[in-house]
Image (cartoon, rainbow, N blue to C red):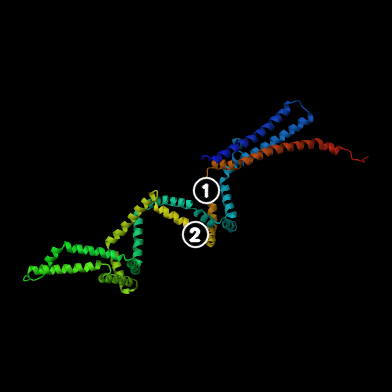
Amino acid sequence: MATDFPEEKTQRAALARQRGIATGLLVFMLAVLVATFLVPAVPFWTGLVRAAAEAGLVGGLADWFAVTALFRRPLGLPIPHTAIVTRQKDRIGVALGQFIATHFLTEEALAPRLRQLDLAGRAARWLAVDANAAGLADRAGALLPFVVARMGDENLRAFFRQALYRELQAGDIAPFAGRALSAVVQGGHHFLLLDEMVGVARAAIRDHRATVMAEVGQRTGRWVPKWVDTKLADALMNGVDDVLQRLAQPGSDARASVDRAVANLAAGLQTDPAWRERLQQWKAKLLTDPALQAMLESLWDDIRARALADLDAPDSRIRAALGAAIGAGGRALLADFGLQERLNRRLEIILTTVLLPQRARISDFIADTVRRWDPAEISDRLELAVGRDLQYIRINGTLVGALAGVGIYLAVEFLPHLFALPLEGGG
């Protein structure tokens, strides 16, 4: 038998106490009956007490038998139609399932109750509390690693790669690139890149001066003196360095021309079909690159590892963001009574359309569940639930039987004398 819960232990103690009272009253009636045969006989009073004790004993025994027969065989005897709960458990389960399906799982019973519950309003009030939202986020965060760990990495990796590939393939990147570049131009951030590139180019010229001179010498004729080669190389490198220096100088014409060129490119990306077609072709070639395929596949591993590490941290940003989102959603729902009404109506429709067509299956499920229960345990549980009230039946049966015995005895004693009285005015 399953271990009792604390409240069940209290119920079991109360049942034992009530059963002891009922049995004690039955024993008392037996003792009184025996005493009437042992004490000196007083014709009227001894008969009255004996009649009360006999009737109380019979009534108590009858009710004891009836109550006991519900759950077990009285005295272990194979008496027909006893141990009703144990022997008729399956039939009780079928009747219980049919009763619930017929009287509870109906639209007339469910719809008013669902409207009264106001599930959307209750959920909104609960979620609007930051502690509740944070607790729900913590539980969800604790569940996510378990879910991810139980799912195949290969399947997840393939799903992530395919989903991201489809989005990249279907998306038109030209307008997005144009807007992004326009934002960069408006903030002047493209000059940071330009300055970095100018610095790298000027450093390359300085570091490779000898190489440039050698290349110039190889491209001029042998009849050209070396000092002329040197002059040409110096002039070339100095001219390039001057251009780069003007590009790096704020307010210069060269820098302004770069600014206009980048701005025009940003506008063209958003409006020029030629640029859009060109970027689509570049994207198509890039997506077929095996290196990109491998990168997309490995990206899931990185995201998964970072997410699991964050969820495992005490100050998880994912759980914090999830809690904030849940709380914000709860407060938004709490402030929108129209949305609550629509959600309640939708929940009502969903629950009724889901439950009502399944009434027969729910009835069968209840019957099958009861059928699998252990007969002795279900009998014990049922007796624990209603046995205390049944013991009151035993007590009442004993007392009512005693009163009935008194009434019958008095009737037998006095009614003949009443009928034997002469009528007034008789002869």
The C terminus: image quadrant = top right
**276 to the left or right of 2:** left
What's the mark number on residue 369?
Answer: 1
Relative to 143, is 95 on the left or the right?
A: right
* Front residue of 125 and 351: 125
Q: Position of residue 298 (x, y in %)?
A: 31, 56
Q: Residue at x 64, y 38 (%)?
A: 64
Q: What residue do we see at 13% from left, 63% from top?
A: 210
| Neighbours of disc 1 within 10 Å: few (<14), some (14-19), many (20+) | some
Figure check: 285 above or below 359? below
Q: What number is the disc on residue 386?
A: none
Q: Is any part of residue 288 visible from this angle?
A: no
> Residue 19 versus residue 411: which sits nearer the camera?
19
Q: Determine if residue 336 is in view.
A: yes
| Residue designated by label 2 | 332
Few, some or many residues within 10 Å of mark 2 (<14, 14–19, 20+):
some
Type of the residue with mark 1: Thr
| Position of residue 209 measured from the top left corner of the image (x, y, whole percent) | 15, 64
Residue type at mark 2 is: Ala
Residue at 19% over, 67% down: 241
